[in-house]
Image: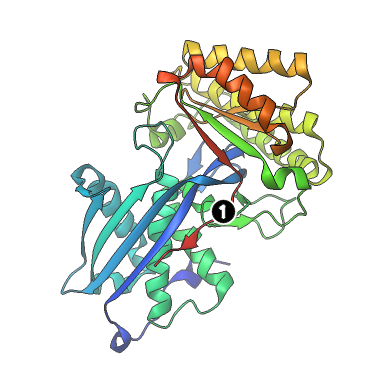
Amino acid sequence: MTEEVFKAQLNPSNFSDFRVGWKSPSNIALVKYWGKKPVQIPANASLSFTLSESCTSTEVQFSLAEASSFDLVFEGKAKPSFHPKIQDFLDRILPYCSFLSAYHLSIETSNSFPHSSGIASSASAMAALALSICSLERELGGLQNEALFFQKASFLSRLGSGSACRSVQGPMMSWGEHPDLENSSDLYGTVFEAELQEVFKSYKDTILLVHKGQKSVSSTAGHDLMKGHIFAASRFEQAQMHLTQLKSVLQNGDLEHFIRIVESEALSLHAMMMSSHPYYILMQPNTLAILHSVMRYRQETKIPVCFTLDAGANVHLLYPESNQTEVQAFIEEELSLFCEQGAYLSDAVGKGSEKIV
């Protein structure tokens, strides 16, 4: 499949006003992608859990207009600081959604989590907006094929935020071509089709908020650090190998191996940033304290809890639903002490986006 299949072919006589809304989740990568090629193509394949509770809800009123334009309200207030990213996104997708040149978009959006909570909302936000645009295209006569509808939504999402292409469906999505993942693609995310062991279908993710502020380096700048990185080739190879291994683990339920892969991926991501030029240390002292506490607790109790990290200081604590009671006590009694104002978010593996209007 090439990008050409995503170029809309619509009859302008069908154009009309339309309102739609989607709720899209964030996701947490188990195998990370770090480094990309133009335009928004990953240097290695990645695999993520789709989350359930950390979501962006977006409603869009599409009104016929003489030229493409938009306005945006975030949680009831105008948000001019969001405009450059939305404009870049709309400009980038216009070759595939030429019908947008005839519309003004009134966008109303909100998060189920505090915007300053340290959860990257670009993935959920771009997925919800892309799905709304695809819904308009379907209303106008295109994208009648269900599979193509979600492929294009993921494709468009990717052009706004790479990881957003993994927020369209669930419970797990991959992104990037990989020889062991059937139908995998660099152009869009695909649902992980192998049969998941039951334990992973209800996995829990508690997000420990060590730092609620913005990251010291943007994701775009972080990915650029991989250009010419002395360890880049080895890292890409490691990620591909880990994905092969994780596919088997997700089918056989080997939680010990799951933990080794997931924690290794998290630490490798930060190792690449700490060994780049310029280098960044995004973990904070309390991040390290949590990691040490988790490893000690796991050794002492034999409860299969593990950590993963995005490109920031916060920690995602992953564990089976069957261990929720014990792990919740561990969080309250020990880990919450390392969180900013004791804050954390409770989440779990989810099913993906849903239409709300």
Q: Residue at coordinates 63% horizontally, 29% vertically from top-left?
A: 265
Measured as percent of width and height from the top left, residue 241 is found at 73, 37
Answer whether residue 222 is visible to the viewer in this image: yes
Measured as percent of width and height from the top left, residue 68 is found at 21, 67
Q: Quadrant of residue 93?
A: bottom left
Residue type at numbered disc 1: Asp
Nearer to us in this view, 117 or 3: 117
Nearer to us in this view, 229 or 297: 297
Q: Quadrant of the C terminus?
A: bottom left
- Residue position for label 1: 186
Measured as percent of width and height from the top left, residue 318 is found at 64, 32
Measured as percent of width and height from the top left, residue 130 is found at 41, 60
Q: Residue at coordinates 27% horizontally, 47% vertically from top-left?
A: 75
Q: Quadrant of the N terminus?
A: bottom right
In the image, residue 307 sits, relative to residue 64, either above or below, namely above
Q: Residue at coordinates 63% horizontally, 13% vertically from top-left?
A: 293
Answer whether residue 277 is visible to the viewer in this image: no
